[in-house]
Image (cartoon, helix red, strand yellow):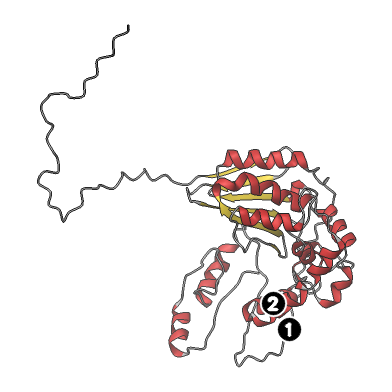
Amino acid sequence: MMELPDYSFYEFKEAEPNPYQGTTLDRSILLDPPAPALTQPKFEFSKLENGMKIASIDKQGLTARLGLYVQAGARFEVPGNLGVAHMAALMGYRSTAHLSHLRTVKTLEQLGAHLSSSATAGREEIAYQVELQREYMPLAVPLMIGNVLFPRLLPWEVKAAQSDVPTAKQALTKDADTMVSELLHKAAYCNNTLGLSPFASERSMGYFTPETIRTYMLDHFAPERMVFVGVNVDHAELSKWVMRAFADYNAIPLKKREDKKAQYTGGDMRLEGASPYCHLALGFESTAFGQTELAPVALVQALLGGGSAIYSGIGSGVTSRLSTQADFTSGNVVKGLVNV
């Protein structure tokens, strides 16, 4: 018969001193956990074998923001497909080779993705963006890659997206700042490159077909013209899942295209409006970003005005005495200088 092990339920020893013996009941004895050491976020950059560029920065936030940018904006359109960049953006997050439109929407909802997840078209690029919790990044990456590389462009989905064109135009007419910027670009670069509007019009609805959109994507949507950006994500993990996403979709081969130089024409454009206020914009031909001549331009920009109307860049937020006095003398003065 085996003997039972000897259990010692009590242990007699000297009592340890109570560190909270002199603490009154109206004071908390719970201490905050030590804060982690502050580390400077590091920007990381890499390039895949197929030519796609990946950039990321991890600020240790709980929410990740992913962006896929394709260099296929409105400046690359031709007279036979004006507005196709906007149309391609409107077809974002719809049916793909692996997911239907309904399944895509349900997947984004289950991932807790931000409802503003959408695709937008600009003059230089088409941007696909998603905001969600950082642990769901591996699920969102192939969904974004699939929308860009293999959209099905079903006829009924294309027809449903056509109704968004008048809605976008109405929103543009109500936004005076955006409308002024559009007219400024059209006057500065009339009928070429940067002067082409990133918004489709009713006259371009005839180009809104699956064939036109697919042809445009096959001409411009090569990985060499794409940049995948992530915020609050690990760079190694992001690169791994972007590379794995291309295993399910064949990359579009790179086609040679003529990158036309923006030709400054100048001029003026005027538009009647129902607003009691007058919105004016005065632009001059300047140098491109990154050139040494940009420094004096930024100085003139700060002297002429300043404030919240200036876009981010060199000299943004700097106000001059002229702009400060204009604020005090008239409450209806809206000023700003934008680098076109």
Q: Quadrant where the C terminus lies?
A: bottom right
Q: Quadrant of the N terminus?
A: top left
Q: Is residue 252 above or below residue 85?
A: above
The reply to whether the C-beta atoms of the residues labelled 2 and 1 are less than 8 Å apart is yes
| Res 156 → quadrant | bottom right
Give the CA distance from mark 2 to mark 1: 7 Å
- Circle 2: is it few (<14), some (14-19), or many (20+) Cα within 10 Å? many
Question: Do we see residue 151 in this rendering?
Answer: yes
Q: Residue furthest front?
A: 1
Q: Is residue 192 visible?
A: no
Residue 93, located in which quarter of the rendered image? bottom right
Residue 80 left/right relative to 304: right
302 or 141, which is in the foreground? 141
User: Residue 161 location, x and y as percent?
Assistant: 79, 68
The answer to which of marks 2 and 1 sits earlier in the sequence is 2
Question: What residue sits 20% from the left and 48% below the top?
Answer: 29
**Amino acid type indicated by mark 2:** Leu
Tell me the element at label 1: loop
Q: Which residue is tagged 1?
A: 269
Residue at x-position 75% and y-position 46%: 224
Could you tell me residue 228's position as x and y percent?
A: 66, 49
Instruction: Give the residue drawn at x 62%, y 78%.
Output: 177
Amino acid type of disc 1? Met
Which label is found at residue 184? 2
Residue 59 placement (x, y as % from top left)? 48, 49
Q: Is residue 323 left or right of residue 19?
A: right
Decide: is 247 above or below 74: above
Q: Is residue 115 above or below residue 322?
A: above
Query: Front-most of 235 and 112?
Result: 112
Q: Residue at x 69, y 82 (%)?
A: 173
